[in-house]
């Protein structure tokens, strides 16, 4: 069994591997700067391996967000911390991961001006987590409004349950729409991940299985079906193109399986971070700092 602190370390390390590959190695390999002993094919395989390892991080962050929601003493402060680091991280996120015109330039403001579409069109993952937090917060308020303190044998129980379920769907849809509209990292898919972890919070096994099957396996089967290929191809062709484009980008998330296995092993305890607020916020600060470091290393080397 593992604690929340161990999960955070795993998430941070795998995220770092993913972002180094995306923010530095991809551009270095494109320019022909391979690691010693590598050719182009080996470099591509190594890059893909790093990105696949990086798929482990996000589900863990979503799971820990839901756990934090249930255990925090001040949800407003929790949301405020996410908003603060989302705002602080945005410039570094753009510089490290989204720009393509003159990515090795040492003038950040000039680089951002030369990349208006990517800089303005994609937002960092803290915004996704913040939207997800607001969604499950609204769900919690809705459930308390309709269900709390009511007996199960109440004649209106079925109606109140239906109203709660419909409210859940409406709130989740609104959150997914906002994340998709502003193109936050992982967009609607990330909000759905948070919603599923929240709805299934009373069953750890379901938390580990259902989100993986629905959000990771299903897109993979549509894109790279290991069996019944004709069936999945036929289903995909029957789906409108706009919906195909919203399903298939998440096929590589199938490599996130280790994160769900680790979630299954979670012991419900916060671990060594519980009594150390400095380390707690250091994990928040690591996100913008490592992105800034990737950008700095890239412009110094390339």
Image (cartoon, rainbow, N blue to C red):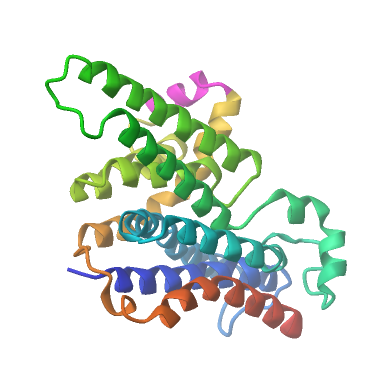
Q: State left or right for residue 133 relative to residue 67.
A: right
What span is colored magenta in the figure?
Answer: 230-240
Query: Where on the picture, by quarter, is residue 115?
Result: bottom right
Give residue 25's position: percent from left, percent from top.
62, 72
Query: Which residue, as the protein is rendered here, is positioned at the far front?
Result: 149
* Residue beneath the point at 35% across and 21% down: 163
Q: Residue furthest left?
A: 153
Residue 31 in the image, given as x and y percentages of width and height: 74, 71
Is 18 part of what is drawn in magenta? no
The image quadrant of residue 145 is: top left
* Image quadrant containing the N terminus: bottom left
Query: Between 276 and 299, which is closer to the camera in this rendering?
Result: 276
Residue 232 in the magenta stretch? The answer is: yes
User: In this rendering, would 156 be left or right of 51?
Assistant: left
Quadrant of the image occupied by residue 216: top left
Q: Inspect this view and state whether residue 190 appears.
A: no
Residue appearing at x 64%, y 69% in the figure = 23
| Image side of residue 193 versus residue 207, left or right | right
**Looking at the image, is 240 positioned above or below residue 72?**
above
The number of discs equals 0
Task: From the top left corner, tell me how far across and down residue 291 is, in percent.
Answer: 62, 72
Q: Tell me which residue sits at (35%, 61%) in the image.
A: 73
Q: Dividing the image into 4 quarters, which one contains the C terminus?
A: bottom right
Residue drawn at (59%, 39%) of the image = 178
Residue situated in front as seen by the camera: 153 or 224: 153
Magenta segment, principal secondary structure?
helix
């Amino acid at each position: 069994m593992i604690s929340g602190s161990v999960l955070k370390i795993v998430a941070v390390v795998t995220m770092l591997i993913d972002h180094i590959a995306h923010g530095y190695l991809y551009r270095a390999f494109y320019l022909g700067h391979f690691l010693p002993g590598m050719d182009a094919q080996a470099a591509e395989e190594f890059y893909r391996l790093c990105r696949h390892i990086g798929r482990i991080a996000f589900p863990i962050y979503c799971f820990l967000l839901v756990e934090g929601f249930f255990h925090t003493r001040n949800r407003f402060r929790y949301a405020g911390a996410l908003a603060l680091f989302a705002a602080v991280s945005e410039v570094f996120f753009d510089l490290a991961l989204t720009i393509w015109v003159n990515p090795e330039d040492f003038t950040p403001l000039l680089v951002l001006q030369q990349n208006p579409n990517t800089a303005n069109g994609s937002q960092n993952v803290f915004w996704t987590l913040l939207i997800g937090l607001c969604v499950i917060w609204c769900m919690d308020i809705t459930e308390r409004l309709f269900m709390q303190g009511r007996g199960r044998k109440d004649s209106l129980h079925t109606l109140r349950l239906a109203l709660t379920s419909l409210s859940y769907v409406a709130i989740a849809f609104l959150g997914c729409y906002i994340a998709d509209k502003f193109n936050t990292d992982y967009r609607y898919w990330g909000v759905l991940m948070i919603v599923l972890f929240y709805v299934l919070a009373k069953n750890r096994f379901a938390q580990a299985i259902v989100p993986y099957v629905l959000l990771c396996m299903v897109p993979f089967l549509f894109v790279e079906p290991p069996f019944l290929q004709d069936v999945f191809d036929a289903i995909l062709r029957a789906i409108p193109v706009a919906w195909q484009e919203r399903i298939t980008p998440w096929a590589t998330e199938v490599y996130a399986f280790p994160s769900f296995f680790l979630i299954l092993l979670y012991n419900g305890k916060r671990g060594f971070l519980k009594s150390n607020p400095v380390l707690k916020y250091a994990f928040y600060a690591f996100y913008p700092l490592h992105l800034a470091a990737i950008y700095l290393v890239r412009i110094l080397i390339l």
